[in-house]
């Protein structure tokens, strides 16, 4: 899943998007928003999360609208409203909370 997400390139992918009927997501993003703006952003560190049985436990009341692509339908982009912050619980790939 990580290879597929990175090849797209994307910042997140859910197992059903790659025909795996499991509750697993992978998410990878720059730890600092400023790193994404760097000329050579490839050298900036990214944080990778693999979450099994993810569950959103909190979400901010503030939202923003942004353009997002869909890795399941390449070339398709649309305006999506997202919460500015979410808290997710689940297990890592080793079964730890």
Image (spheres, helix red, strand yellow):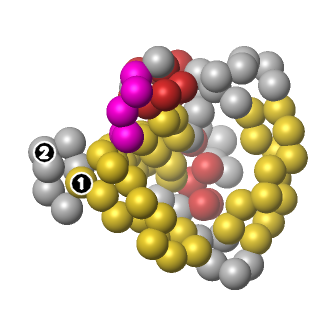
Instruction: Report the front residue among 25 and 10.
Output: 25
Left or right: residue 90 compared with residue 61: left
| Residue position marked by numbered label 1 in the rendering | 91
- Classify mark 1: helix, strand or loop: strand
Tell me whether the residue at label 2 lies in contact with that at label 1, contact meaning CB atoms closer than 8 angstroms.
yes
Q: Report the magenta residues as a range.
A: 20-24
Q: Residue at x 61, y 60 (%)?
A: 34
The residue depicted at 23 percent of the width and 50 percent of the height is 92
Q: Secondary structure at mark 2?
A: loop
* Residue 65 belongs to the span the image colors magenta: no
Q: Residue furthest bottom?
A: 61
Q: Callout 2 environment at 10 Å: few (<14), some (14 to 19), or many (20+)?
A: few
When the figure is inspected, residue 88 is found, relative to residue 22, above or below; the finding is below
> How far separated are the C-alphas under marks 2 and 1?
7 Å
Which residue is depicted at the point 59% across and 33% down?
10
Task: Kindly indicate the quadrant of the structure image that contains residue 71.
Answer: top right
Q: Is residue 43 above or below residue 54?
A: above
Residue 44: x and y in percent read 47, 46
Q: Is residue 42 visible?
A: no
Circle 1 crowding by C-alpha within 10 Å: few under 14, some 14–19, many from 20:
some
Q: Is residue 29 left or right of residue 8?
A: left
Residue annotated with mark 2: 94
């Amino acid at each position: 899943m990580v290879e597929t997400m990175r090849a797209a390139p994307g910042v997140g992918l859910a197992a059903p998007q790659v025909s795996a009927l499991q509750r697993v997501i992978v998410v990878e993003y720059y730890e600092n928003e400023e790193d994404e703006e760097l000329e050579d952003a490839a050298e900036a560190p990214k944080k990778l999360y693999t979450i099994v049985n993810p569950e959103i436990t909190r979400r901010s009341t503030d939202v923003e609208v942004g353009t997002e692509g869909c890795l399941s339908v390449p070339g398709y982009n649309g305006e999506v409203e997202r919460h500015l912050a979410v808290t997710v619980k689940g297990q890592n790939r080793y079964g730890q909370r």
